Structure formats: C-alpha cells, structure tokens
Image: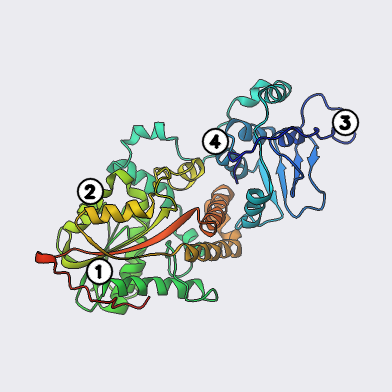
C-alpha cells in the first residue's frame, strides 16, 4: 500500500462534481485521479460526496474526513495512508481489518500511480487550500520520528533499544495470545505442508532449530531474544536441555516465567529480563537467536556475533534465524510505516552480509536455508487468528492498534510472497583448536 512507486502519465479528465451540488474546488476524486492513471479496479469515495471507480468494485477506499486527505497529502506513501487508516479517516471496505491482504494486493498490483505535473499539483493545492499541507497530529500508535528518538539515546544504545522493544512487544500479552495462538511464538513457523496448523508448524520450527543445534539432555542452551520463552520451554520439555532465555521485554519475561512454572519446567528452563549484552558469560553448548538480529542494527553485527561467540563453547553451534533483505545492496533501514508503527529502529541486511558477518566474527558457517515462503504462511495464520478474535483484540488494545497489526501482518505476508524480504537460517560452529568442531560429514538433523 504505497504512493511512492509512481509512474509518469498524462492527466485524465477530472471526476464530475457530487450529485446535487456545485463544485467550488477540486474534489477528493480529483485528487485521486491526479495521482493515478487508467481505470481503477477499486471504488474511491470522498467525504465531499465525490466518487471514482466502478460502483460494483469489491473493494472501496473511503476517504472519510478532511483530516484523512491531509494525512495523504502531507505524507505521501505508506506513512500517510497508515495514519489515515489507523485513525479511522480512511476506510478499506470489502476486507476485514484483521486481514486486509486482498486490498493491499489489488492496490499494489492494479492501481497504477503517477507523479502529477508541477502545474497540476499547484492548481490542486491552491483549490484545496494551503492548510491541507499542514500535517495533522499523528495517531497515538505512531512512534516518534528518528530525530526525536535521539532524546532517548543514540540508535541501538541500551536505553533506546529497550524503548523500541517495549513499543512493539509490550502491547498486551492477552492480545498476543489470541493472535499468535497457544504457542505464543512470534517468529516464522516451518510447514511440512500447507495443510499444517499454525501450532504444528511452530513445533516443527522448534524441532528444526533443536535438530540443527544437536540438542541433547544435559546440554546448556542460551536463547537470545527469547520472546515468551517458546524455544526455552520446548528445549527443556522435549530435549531435557537446561535452557536460559533473555529478552528486553518485561511483559514477555513475566509471561514466560509464569508459563515455565505452570508447565513444571523450572528445574530446566529460565527466562530473564535482560539485554543480550548482559547475558551470562558462562560457556553454553548451543545458542539460538530467533528473531533478534533484526533489532540490533547492522553496524552492530560484529559486536553482536562476537558476543555470542564468547558465550559459546568450542565445538558449540549457533543457529541464527532472522528476516533479511532479498538484495544485499538494499538499504538497511525499514520504511516509514514499519519504523513508526511496528519496529522502531529495525534494520535488515541481505543474506550475504549476514553470513559474512557471522563468518568474520570467527564462526565457521556450515548451512543456510531460506524460509520466506514459510513466513508468508505464518502471517496468513496470524491474520486468521486476528480476524477470529477481532472483538476481543479491539477490546484489549483499541481499534487503532488492532488495525496496525492487521495492516502490518497482511502487508508483510505480501512482501514475503513477492520475495521483497526473506527469512534465513544460518548454522555455524565455534571451532576449537586446529579447526575441531564436532560437525559431522553430513547434517545430523532432519531438513
């Protein structure tokens, strides 16, 4: 859902005035027509009564207020549309707010956008009034812009990272229980077939990680960025491993501790509210990092992987699971919507950069695989859960935040399907003297 990928084109004839009224300036339909070309596959309705597109379209974009139009004009692209949508000033009719996937697909694939000529743009703005270019206050769900975050510290400092993690993860454990399902696992699942349930696929993922790490009873596992303790509890329960998880989210740590107690795993599993940089320096037999690398900043990769290596015994294995760019040359920073509404300060690198950094930190890389199609299926499952439990979720976090999650998950699903982003597993060892690592000639885990 973006107005940034525009194509040049000649202006089409403006839409007619609203029925029964006399137009004294450009209508909402005129503005939409100025930035699109060709026939629209969706219906557009304006607060002024103007309309555009087929009356029988399956999807309608309803610009309900003057503020909504100002959001779109003052922040063209994903950010303006997100502001208008989250605030309720822009409606997506014909799709459920918990899963607006089809609307995003149609807008991306079938709504051709263009940049209007300067003279055309000036005429529209004069007709609408220059006050339309005064940005309205953003919705409360929006994080501060990057420049204002300097007040809480430099990017990826401890305090700023803690604030960013809290923005995303300390929403509501009850909300996450409904969206993520019983496993409370907020990372890519692994599907043996498209018919697997989300819970089956999450178990598959944990078993795959455990297999790659060669977990066995009595081993010590460190899980950094452990979330609600899913890997920690699975490793302790299914493999007899003594597992320690660390997370910067206090809400996650509290929930995980209660789950560990409830499941009778306290002798083997532990979760601490802790920065990965403060994790114990004891020598662990294996380390899993499942969904943390996206938060630490690309420039911090050397220090990050160095810190993990220093906590891993010679011969021990590291499994790093993270979202990546599809292109090693792509910018690291996320787009405006993701940065302001979902993952403040999040950064992604390409798989080549990721593997190089792991290698240069002193690990030996043995195996890599891309699970991006699995993440598309995972996100589809989370959206189904949000739709099913929509009323509860709205009651728990409010309609604005619930809409942010539907928009974010459906948009991410589309990005994974189209190979805009990927999900990579990288398996590596901390070699001992003379290259000894205990890794077998062929993989000892089931793909």
Q: Distance from label 3 to label 4 (Cα)?
A: 32 Å
Name the residue rendered at 41%, 35% in the picture.
Answer: 146
Q: Which mark is residue 21?
A: 3
Q: Distance from label 1 to label 2 (Cα)?
A: 23 Å
Position above or below: 157 against 280: above
Q: The C terminus lies in which quarter of the figure? A: bottom left
In percent of width and height, residue 155 lies at: 33, 39
Q: Nearer the viewer, mark 2 or mark 3?
A: 2
Residue under label 4? 138
Name the residue rendered at 72%, 55% in the picture.
Answer: 94
Q: Earlier in the sequence, mark 4 or mark 2?
A: 4
Q: Distance from label 4 to label 2 (Cα)?
A: 36 Å
Is residue 170 something one can see in this rendering?
Answer: no
Residue under label 2? 303
Q: Secondary structure at mark 1?
A: strand
Identify which residue, 147 or 117, lies in the foreground.
Answer: 117
Residue under label 1? 243
Classify 10 Å Cα crowding around label 2: few (below 14), some (14-19), many (20 and above).
some
Classify 10 Å Cα crowding around label 3: few (below 14), some (14-19), many (20 and above).
few
Q: Earlier in the sequence, mark 3 or mark 1?
A: 3
Q: Earlier in the sequence, mark 2 or mark 3?
A: 3
């Amino acid at each position: 859902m973006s107005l940034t990928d525009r194509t040049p084109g000649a202006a089409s004839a403006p839409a007619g005035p609203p029925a029964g009224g006399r137009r004294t300036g450009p209508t909402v339909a005129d503005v939409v027509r100025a930035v699109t070309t060709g026939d629209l596959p969706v219906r557009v309705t304006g607060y002024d009564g103007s309309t555009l597109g087929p009356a029988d379209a399956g999807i309608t974009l309803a610009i309900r207020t003057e503020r909504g139009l100002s959001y779109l004009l003052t922040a063209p692209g994903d950010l303006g549309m997100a502001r208008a949508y989250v605030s309720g000033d822009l409606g997506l009719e014909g799709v459920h707010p918990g899963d607006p996937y089809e609307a995003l697909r149609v807008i991306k694939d079938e709504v051709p956008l263009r940049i209007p000529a300067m003279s055309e743009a000036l005429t529209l703005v004069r007709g609408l009034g220059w006050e339309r270019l005064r940005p309205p206050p953003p919705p409360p769900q929006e994080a501060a812009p990057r420049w204002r975050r300097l007040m809480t510290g430099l990017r990826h400092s401890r305090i700023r990272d803690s604030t960013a993690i809290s923005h995303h993860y300390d929403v509501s454990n009850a909300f996450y229980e409904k969206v993520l399902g019983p496993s409370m696992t907020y990372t890519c699942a692994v599907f043996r077939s498209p018919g697997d349930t989300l819970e089956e696929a999450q178990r598959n993922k944990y078993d795959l990680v455990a297999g790659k790490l060669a977990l066995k009873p009595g081993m010590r596992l460190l899980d950094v960025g452990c979330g609600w303790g899913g890997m920690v509890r699975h490793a302790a329960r299914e493999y007899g491993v003594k597992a320690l998880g660390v997370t910067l989210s206090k809400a996650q740590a509290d929930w995980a501790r209660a789950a560990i107690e409830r499941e009778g795993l306290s002798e083997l599993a532990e979760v601490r509210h802790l920065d990965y940089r403060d994790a114990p320096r004891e020598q662990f037999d294996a380390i899993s990092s499942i969904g943390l690398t996206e938060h630490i900043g690309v420039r911090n990769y050397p220090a990050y992987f160095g810190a993990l290596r220093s906590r891993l015994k010679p011969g021990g294995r590291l499994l790093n699971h993270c979202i990546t760019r599809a292109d090693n040359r792509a910018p690291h920073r996320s787009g405006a919507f993701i940065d302001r509404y979902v993952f403040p300060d999040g950064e992604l690198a390409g798989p080549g950069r990721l593997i190089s950094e792991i290698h240069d930190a002193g690990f030996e890389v043995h195996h890599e695989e891309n699970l991006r199609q699995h993440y598309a299926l995972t996100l589809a499952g989370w959206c189904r859960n949000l739709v099913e439990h929509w009323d509860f979720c709205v009651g728990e976090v409010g309609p604005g935040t619930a809409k942010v999650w539907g928009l974010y998950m459906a948009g991410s699903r589309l990005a994974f399907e189209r190979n805009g982003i990927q999900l990579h597993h990288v398996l590596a060892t901390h070699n001992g003297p003379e290259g000894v690592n205990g890794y077998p000639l062929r993989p000892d885990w089931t793909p």
